Amino acid sequence: MGKRVAIVGSGQTYHKSARLDVNGIELIHEAVTRALEDTQLTLKDIDAVVIGNMDHFEGINYVDTWSVDGAGACLKPIFKVTTGGTTGSTVAMAGYYTAASGLFDTVLAIGWEKNSESDTTGAIITAFDPIWDRPAFAGAVAGLAVEASVYMHQYGVTEKDAARVSVRDRRHATKNPHAHLRGEISVDDVLNSPMLSYPIKLLDMCPRTDGACAVIFAAEGRAEKITDKPAWVWATATRHNYVYIGDWEPTAGLKTLESASREVYQKVGIREPLKEIDVMELYLPYSFAGLSWIESLGLCGKGEAPRLLWDGVTDMGGELPINPSGGVISCNPIGATALIRVAEAAMQIQGKAEQHQVPDVKVALATGFGGCFWSDIMIMGKQIK
Amino acid sequence: MERVAVVGVGQTKYERRKKGDSFADMVFEATSKALQDARMTIKEIDNVVTVSNDFWDGRTISSMAVMDACGAYEKNVSTVEGDGTFGVLYGMMRILSGSFGTTLVVAHCKGSESVSSLITNGMFDPIYQRALGLDAITSSALQARAYMNRYGIREEQCARVSVKNHGNAKNNPFAQIPLNITVKEVMASRMLSDPIKLLDASPISDGSAAVILADEKRAEKIDQQPIWIKGIGHCADAYFLGDRDLAECPSLEAAAKKAYAMAGITDPLKEIDVAEIYDAFSYMELLWSEGLGFCGRGEGGKFVDSGKSRMEGKLPINPSGGVLSAHAVLVAGLARVCECVLQLRGDAGARQVEGVKTAVAQGINGPCGQSQCVIVLGN
């Protein structure tokens, strides 16, 4: 049987649209240094490193070997994982499994991206099958626009409802010094922003960001020595189903998230997520996801999410605050994005979130989204389980 | 610690160009063969680790192309970008975590659809190094020269590795280039980048390989001889070639040290019966033989001269024909693991080494074997 594992600390860079002051290795170094400071560890204490990003954004091949100076992995074990938008959560899981395996006690997990060096959409389009899908249905926005349209059509949800999600996340971001976009916006701002792909407007959509995040995982026995407030990982799950457009049912809801969340709920015995989970850090790349996907997570019935949003249930101070960090709509260094969700969820449990701390968090959930309608989940708690 | 076994292996034939096969076709073939080998169905696979690289595939999220082909639908799945041996490492750790009883690890690559020199140029620093024209071949040539100069290794000694491995490949139906060649012919082959000549270099290949891992409990129930992972280690050296001593391989030494300690191996030459190592270029087999402790530092040339690494020698190296005889990048390390498993099961056909009890597989990532993974397997 494997070891139980906790997140003992993390570090993030200050995220911007273009971090011209650093190269990728220096960006990684910044996050790693902060994670070490946060845990009062030195590189000598790190037994293994896992890293991830999306190659085509920076045009660097074999990032695991390229990054060793920044990652502190020289003459250490390191390997790379990558799964597109879910890369950050994939890295988190690799950190978790590596520490749980019993082979390594303290594991540094790094996600990063320097989107300013890329043609983001150009790179994403190449994810899709070159013959069948690429000319017709590829890139980040197209699929989401179809999903949003279907959702609006099926449940009478409006663009204004979706705007409420952007408003919430951007408001939360004002309290997070690491967020990229820290200005508050109104529903009207969102509705009046330029149309990208109907019904998605500029302020419905996440930005592209330069940034890195490092999270330190430690096995039971080691974790308690590093911090008296570890965030114990309870369960994780992954669903990467989509290959071709025909694999996706254009019906409302994120099926992979539904399936992955049911797996973790079942593993840890959660029946009523809205009541039993104290905070969520969700990979919501655009506003409509903040409605439809929380239904997929089982927080409410289909088509009921707008009510939760307008009632303030998911705001800071609400019953289940979502994205106290400001979420992906406020900050999106892609390979780091899902790892930031994990780091922020752990910070909430550890009581380290300062201005955006939710009081008394016992259970937190983080998600990753990517590939194409792929989902990752990690659930963690104050108690060891 | 719990033990993890390899309970099934599958490989496509490695070919210069698999015109009729997409990435998914190759992955489906290797996966199906591994399942067949383990006498399992995809339902018995608890989780999947795929191995691919966005540069080699020309696809961002290269794993997306094979999610259906490897049967990952509705399963927990992840993707290692690196050599297949690192995929085995991660697949094994996912089992050791207690979360899964079985892992399918599958790697694919189509060298025929790639421009190798551009893609491997992409692993170098974009400002200071790429413009120099560094790629896998030229950087390895620097390493070969550094190594040969320090220890007086001769080109003929490297050539001997090619002669041996291409000869071994004649007995491996999966190998791409079985050859009857002489040291003279290797020496006379076209110079690619001094001292690496055409016959010192591995080919461009298409192919896929898969292994199925299982914990002890599941392995017992599977109708195939389990081959146990006795030890595993991985480690990365510095990045910039100028920061490294290219004539040595400290990351391989560290990875091997860890793997051997886990496996209880103190005298590798004596205790290991067969080794499958990453000979992307002929000199690598000599240098890696030193890193793996088969001979002392600088003795790689003498080691191949001694005949110890031949099929009938004390420690046959690359009975499969090695990477020199088929080099589907990323897949190659997994192919090494597959061959070790076949040797340990006694299923290696005409290339079977007698009485194999312990085997070692090696994989590399990055320029000049910067990052290394060593796996000790036993029956």
Image (tube, coloured by chain):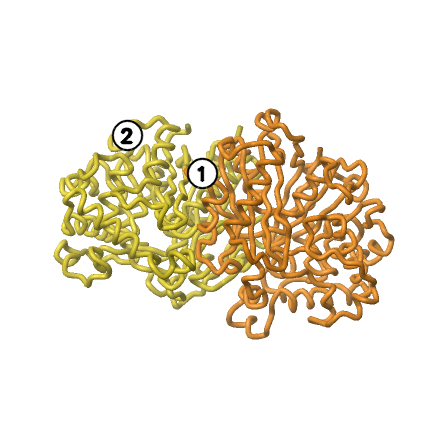
Chain colours: A yellow, B orange
Q: Residue furthest left?
A: A188
**The disc labelled 1 sits on which kind of residue?**
Asn
Instruction: Determine the secondary structure under disc 1.
Output: strand
Name the side, left or right, on which A383 lies relative to B21. Answer: left
Q: What's the residue at 45%, 44% (across, down)?
A: B68
Q: Position of residue A191 (x, y in %)?
A: 15, 57
> In which quadrant of the rendered image does the C terminus of chain B lie?
top right
Of residues B157 and A25, the one drawn nearer to the viewer in this rendering: B157
Q: What's the residue at 68%, 58% (across, down)?
A: B280
- Give the crowd class for mark 1: few <14, some 14-19, many >=20 residues within 10 Å: many
Res A3 seen here: no
Q: Residue furthest bottom?
A: B131
Q: Position of residue A152 (x, y in %)?
A: 18, 47
Name the side, left or right, on which A103 lies relative to A275. Answer: right
When asked about the image quadrant of residue A105, the answer is top right
Q: What's the residue at 21%, 37% (across, down)?
A: A302
* Distance between mark 2 and mark 1 Cα atoms: 24 Å
Q: Position of residue B24 (x, y in %)?
A: 50, 49
Q: Position of residue B216 (x, y in %)?
A: 60, 28
**The disc labelled 2 sits on which kind of residue?**
Glu
- Give the crowd class for mark 2: few <14, some 14-19, many >=20 residues within 10 Å: some
**Protein chain holding label 1:** B
Name the side, left or right, on which A69 lies relative to B376. Answer: left
Task: Name the residue tied to disc 1.
Answer: B76
Res B235 seen here: yes
Task: Name the residue tied to disc 2.
Answer: A276
Of residues B58 and A136, the one drawn nearer to the viewer in this rendering: A136
> In which quadrant of the rendered image does the N terminus of chain B lie?
top right
2 and 1 marks in contact (CB < 8 Å)? no
Of residues A141 and A205, the one drawn nearer to the viewer in this rendering: A141
